[in-house]
Each structure stands twice: as structure tokens, then as C-alpha cells.
Amino acid sequence: MDAVVIAGGVPKPEDPLYVFTQGQPKALLDVAGKPMAQWVLDALEGASQVERVVVIGLDKESGLACTKPLRYFSSQGGMLQNIVFGVEQVIAQNPDARQVLLVSSDIPGIKAEMVDWVINNAMKTDDDLYYHVITQEVMEKRYPGSKRTYTHLKDVVVCGGDMNVVAARAIHTNRNTWERLIEARKSPLKQATIFGWDVLLGLALRTITIDETVRKITQRLGMRGRAVRCPFAEVGMDVDKPHQLELMRTDLGK
């Protein structure tokens, strides 16, 4: 399976991490002696199920390395635009690609075996989207004090994972859906028209389960989706705040 690494984020002055990045990509922040994105590439390099890698948002001058075929492309704007563009580049090189691994560049704690677990699990069925979640229990046990943002559902408390799998066909056959998502990313009203008021109300009142949430949303997007409870906290331990950066520097510097 080919992997797309989303690395297009450049913190603005009002961002908590700007004091560390000073206008440079967040993906290049030093974490225990290596750029944050290099930890991600190292995990992909060691994963037996990853064939090729596409990085969106950086270039060859970034100094990153990977022994597997690696291509760089500039950022296309926001995250959704970068995801769509990245999957399109995978398909352009490999028209027979069935699934694509999507990985954020800011989860430096992931390891090769975690990557393989995510891919192997997704290859068992034929859904359009495999969205990984980490329970609060798993996250707090591995990273106590990480101060993640959790979603309280009827059956579980979770945070979202930053390594997921999407079917290549979903980009081709649901292009209008992706465009609607891009347009709605900053409008709660537009999001409600896509996801449905019942889902938003269920989330607010905690009367909907994780499986119901993913199923209803993906159905309305014209896709088949599956919520996957990931046993690895590292998949959801992204670096968004200074204390999370320090946490990962300490953890990986051991």
C-alpha cells in the first residue's frame, strides 16, 4: 500500500507552536534530534506493507530521508485539499491502487509495527474509509497528562487518530463529496447539511455510539466507513501544543 504523508501545516503567529517554528513547517520541528516528519518516515520505511511514499507540503530540500520510493509535492491549501491531491498522485503512479494510507506528519511516536497493523486491518474488508480512534483509557495510560481533546459518545470516550486508510475509488467516485467537505470545513451550518442534524445533536447529547456516528456520516457522504478502535495511543498523539511537543521530545529522547 502506498502512503501519503500530510505535512503542509505552517503555524501562524497566533498558533501556540509559532514560537518554535518561526514561519517554518511544523513537520520539521526538532523532536529528540530529528525532524518530526522523519520519525514518521522512519516508521513507514520499516513497515513491510508500505511500498511508496508521497509527502505533501515539503520538498527535497527538507533534508528528510526514506529508503522507499519518495516523492514530494507542494501544499495544495488545507488538509482536505492535500489529502485529495495526495491520493490522486498515488493513483497517477499506480492506477491499480485499491487503498491508500493517510498519515499526518505530526505523530512522531508511531512505529513500523503500528503502521502494518493499520494496513493489515484495513485489508480485511472493502470499506471506503477506516477511521481510527483511540479510547481515553488507552491514551491516558500511554501519555498521562497529554491533554487530548476527547469526544464523549454514548458508548465510549475517544480522540481521533492521525493514521487512516481510504479507498482510492472514494476519491474518484465521490469528488463532489470531497469538494463539499472542503467548502464546509469552516461552516457549522454547511457541516450540518452534510452530516445531518441528528448526528450533531447525538454528539452534543452523547446519545449516539461511535459506530453509528461513522456509519451515518459516511453513508451521507456516499461512502462506506468503519470506526476502528486502535490499540496504539501513538497513532493519536499528535503535536499541536507546546506541552505536547515537550512530551514527545522527552518520550522519544529516552
Image: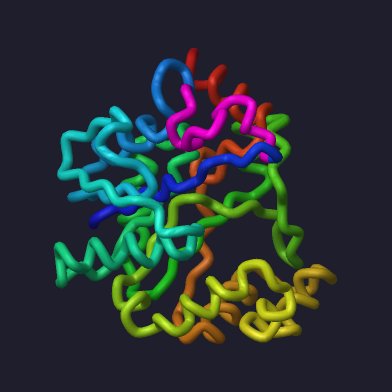
Residue 59, given in percent of the width and then of the height, sits at 30, 40
Query: Could you say which is closer to the camera, residue 29 or residue 3?
Result: 29
Question: Which residue is at 55% across, 26% downward?
Answer: 248
Q: Is residue 106 left or right of residue 190?
A: left
Work out which quarter of the rendered image holds the N terminus and state it.
Answer: bottom left
Identity of the residue drawn at 67% across and 39% down: 15
Quadrant of the image occupied by residue 174: bottom left
50 lies above or below 199: above
In this picture, residue 135 sits left or right of residue 49: right
Query: Left or right of 95: which side holds 234?
Result: right
Q: Nearer the viewer, residue 202 or 41?
A: 41
How is colour applied across the structure in the image? rainbow
Residue at image position (56%, 55%) is 133
Q: Assess whether residue 227 is covered by the magenta stretch.
A: no
Figure disc tally? 0
Choose top left, top right, bottom left or bottom right for residue 217: bottom right
Image coords of residue 115 (percent x, y): 35, 45
| Outermost residue to the right | 205
Spot occupied by residue 63 in the image (x, y as percentages of width and height): 29, 28
* Lateral position of residue 232 relative to residue 47, left or right: right
Asked if the magenta segment contains residue 22, the reply would be: yes
- Specify the quadrant of the image occupied by residue 242: top right
The residue under the point 62% across, 41% down is: 12
Above or below — where is 113 with respect to 92? above
Could you tell me residue 49's position as x and y percent?
Answer: 23, 49
Residue lying furthest top = 254
Q: Nearer the viewer, residue 27 or 133?
A: 27
Q: Is residue 192 above or below residue 239?
A: below
What span is in magenta? 15-30
